[in-house]
C-alpha cells in the first residue's frame, strides 16, 4: 500500500502571502473563486501553478493523494480542475480552525487519525516542531511533515524531498 500524501491548499498550492506583493509570481495564475464560505464581497483570489498539477500527478505513482485542507470537498470543484488533478479524497474536519491546548496545530490530530497507522507525508504552511513531536509520539509508522512557505508555495526542492521520502 502506498503512503498517503496529505495536501493543504492555502500556503502550499496557493501562496496567499504573495498576494500582498504587486504582480503574480512566476509560474502562477490568478483565479477568482467563490467557494461556499465566500459569499460576500469580491471573489477570493487564489494563485495556482499549473506545473504543480503535473508534479503531484507524478508523485501519485508513489503516493495516494488526498486533500488536507479546509476546502474539503470543494477542493475537487475549485482547485483540482485548474491543476489538472482528478477528484481526490479529503479529510472531513470535525471542526474548522479549532485549537489544541498544547500548542499543536489544530489539524495535526485529525491528520494522524485520517492516516490510521499508514505511512504519510503532509504538506502545510502551519506545521511546527510541536506537531513533529506530537506525531512522533502518536503515529506508529513512517511520516514526514513538510512546512511550505506561504510566500512561495511548493518548490522543486519540496517535490524532490517528497519523492525521495516515498522512495525510502
Image: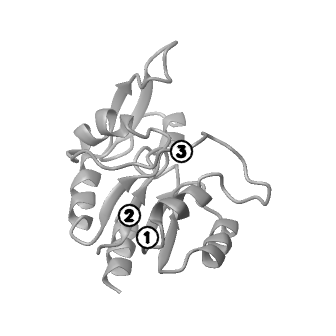
Label at residue 34:
none
Residue at left offset 47%, top offset 44%: 92
In this rendering, the answer to whether 25 lies above or below 144 is above
The residue pinned by badge 2 equals 5
Looking at the image, the residue that sits furthest to the bottom is 168
- Alpha carbon of mark 3 to alpha carbon of mark 2: how far? 17 Å
Q: Between disc 3 and disc 1, whose residue precedes?
A: 3
Q: Nearer the viewer, residue 166 or 31?
A: 166
Q: Quadrant of the N terminus?
A: bottom left
Residue at left offset 64%, top offset 41%: 97
Estimate how packed mark 1 is, as few (under 14), some (14 to 19) or many (20 or more) residues with alpha carbons within 10 Å.
Answer: many
Is disc 1 placed on a helix, strand or loop?
Answer: strand
The residue pinned by badge 3 equals 93
Estimate how packed mark 2 is, as few (under 14), some (14 to 19) or many (20 or more) residues with alpha carbons within 10 Å.
Answer: many
In this rendering, the answer to whether 26 lies above or below 123 is above
Is disc 2 placed on a helix, strand or loop?
Answer: strand
Is disc 3 placed on a helix, strand or loop?
Answer: loop
Q: Nearer the viewer, mark 3 or mark 2?
A: 3
- Alpha carbon of mark 1 to alpha carbon of mark 2: how far? 6 Å
In this rendering, the answer to whether 7 lies above or below 159 is above
Q: Nearer the viewer, mark 3 or mark 1?
A: 3
Residue at left offset 34%, top offset 67%: 159
Q: Nearer the viewer, residue 9 or 77?
A: 77
The residue pinned by badge 1 equals 120
**Residue 86 image point, x, y percent:** 21, 47
Q: Are discs 1 and 2 less than 8 Å apart at CB?
A: yes
**Residue 45 image point, x, y percent:** 43, 28
**Residue 53 image point, x, y percent:** 25, 51
Q: Is residue 66 left or right of residue 122?
A: left
In this rendering, the answer to whether 45 lies above or below 18 is above
Amino acid at each position: 500500500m502506498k503512503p498517503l500524501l496529505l495536501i493543504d491548499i492555502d500556503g502550499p498550492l496557493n501562496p496567499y502571502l504573495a498576494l500582498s506583493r504587486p504582480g503574480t509570481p512566476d509560474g502562477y495564475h490568478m483565479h477568482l473563486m467563490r467557494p461556499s464560505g465566500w459569499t460576500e464581497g469580491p471573489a477570493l483570489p487564489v494563485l495556482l501553478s499549473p506545473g504543480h498539477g503535473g508534479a503531484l500527478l507524478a508523485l501519485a505513482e508513489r503516493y495516494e493523494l488526498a486533500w488536507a485542507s479546509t476546502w474539503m470537498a470543494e477542493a475537487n470543484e475549485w482547485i483540482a480542475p485548474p491543476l489538472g488533478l482528478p477528484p481526490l479524497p479529503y479529510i472531513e474536519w470535525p471542526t474548522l480552525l479549532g485549537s489544541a491546548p498544547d500548542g499543536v496545530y489544530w489539524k495535526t490530530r485529525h491528520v494522524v487519525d485520517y492516516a490510521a497507522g499508514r505511512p504519510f507525508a503532509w504538506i502545510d504552511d502551519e506545521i511546527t516542531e510541536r506537531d513533529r513531536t506530537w506525531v512522533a509520539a502518536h503515529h506508529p509508522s513512517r511520516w514526514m511533515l513538510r512546512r511550505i512557505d506561504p510566500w512561495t508555495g511548493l518548490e522543486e526542492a519540496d517535490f524532490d524531498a517528497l519523492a525521495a521520502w516515498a522512495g525510502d
